[in-house]
Amino acid sequence: TDKLLKELKKRKIILIEDVCESHGAKFKKKKLGTFGFASNFSFYYAHHLSTIEGGMVCTNNKKFYETIKMLRGHGLLRESGNSTYESKIKKKYKNLSPNFIFMYSAFNMRNNEVQAVIGINQLKRLNKNNSIRAKNFEFFLKNLNKDKFFTNFKIPGNSNYAFPIILRSKSIKYRNKFEQHMKKNGIEFRRGNAGGGNQMRQPYIKSYLKKINFKKFKNVEHVHNFGYYIGNYPTLKKIKISKIVKILNSI
């Protein structure tokens, strides 16, 4: 949002965009992943574009680009692609094998050629598939019971990955009944929307923000307890979406 971008600029906070489940999404006609210092995309097999596993980091910053190339390849100097920088470091560490100078304690995350071929070929269909996903989402929302579920999402520019279901009810008893009904009818789901729910409850956040009271964030807490994801994909037919909606509305 404009408010977020303005606040980040004011506070001089670097924006790193998480576009893992939003390939092709736009804000004011500009693609997400092009606003910040860097952005990351996931190519997990259920996402808009898949290489089975893996992903991609985008940036216009040359130094950061060289650094993350080293980080994905064991931290090796030779992965940087910067011959001037590599020569400088090799001179500094003459007693080390020039091909095995480790600049970082890093990872083994290099994609292989097969994954690249799979991903590149899917790029040809990405816009078309995203359009189908968007139509599926609109059809889903249009037919969902507005008294039982939140449906007033701002969807312009959206690139839908999965159908979000957020119960209006705050009853745990009703929620449990709702989940049992979905399981009984073979509807797979994740509670907490993307799966992790309120991130302020997660151990990794608590390790940084030890005194934070996650219960103060009521909307996030509601999604954590009463929000779900169910699958959307380009070959999902309207007749099946109608069946899913009918099951959800009947609870």
Image: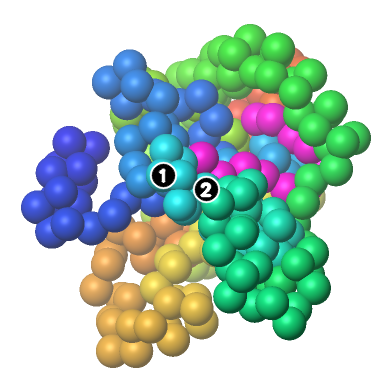
- Which residue lies under the disc numbered 1? 61
Q: Is residue 229 above or below residue 206?
A: above
Quadrant in which residue 214 is drawn: bottom left
Q: Position of residue 83 (x, y in %)?
A: 61, 49
The quarter of the picture where the C terminus appears is top right
Image point (70%, 12%), residue name: 124
Image point (87%, 36%), residue name: 113
Q: Which residues are magenta?
A: 48-58
Q: Is residue 38 left or right of residue 236?
A: left
Q: Position of residue 93 (x, y in %)?
A: 64, 77
For residue 75: magenta? Answer: no
For the residues labelled 2 and 1, the Cα–Cα distance comes to 6 Å
Q: Is residue 125 left or right of residue 201?
A: right
Mark 1 secondary-structure assignment: loop
Residue 172, labelled with which disc? none
Q: Is residue 150 left or right of residue 112?
A: left
Q: Position of residue 84 (x, y in %)?
A: 55, 51
What count of labels does the image hold? 2
Q: Say if residue 201 shows up in the picture.
A: yes
Image point (71%, 65%), residue name: 76
Quadrant in which residue 112 is drawn: top right
Image point (79%, 45%), residue name: 111
- Which residue lies under the disc numbered 2? 65
The quarter of the picture where the N terminus appears is top left
The amino acid on which the numbered mark 1 sits, given as a three-letter code, is Asn
Mark 2 secondary-structure assignment: helix
Q: Are marks 2 and 1 in contact (CB under 8 Å)?
A: yes
* Dominant SS type (magenta): loop
The amino acid on which the numbered mark 2 sits, given as a three-letter code, is Tyr
Colour setup of the view:
rainbow
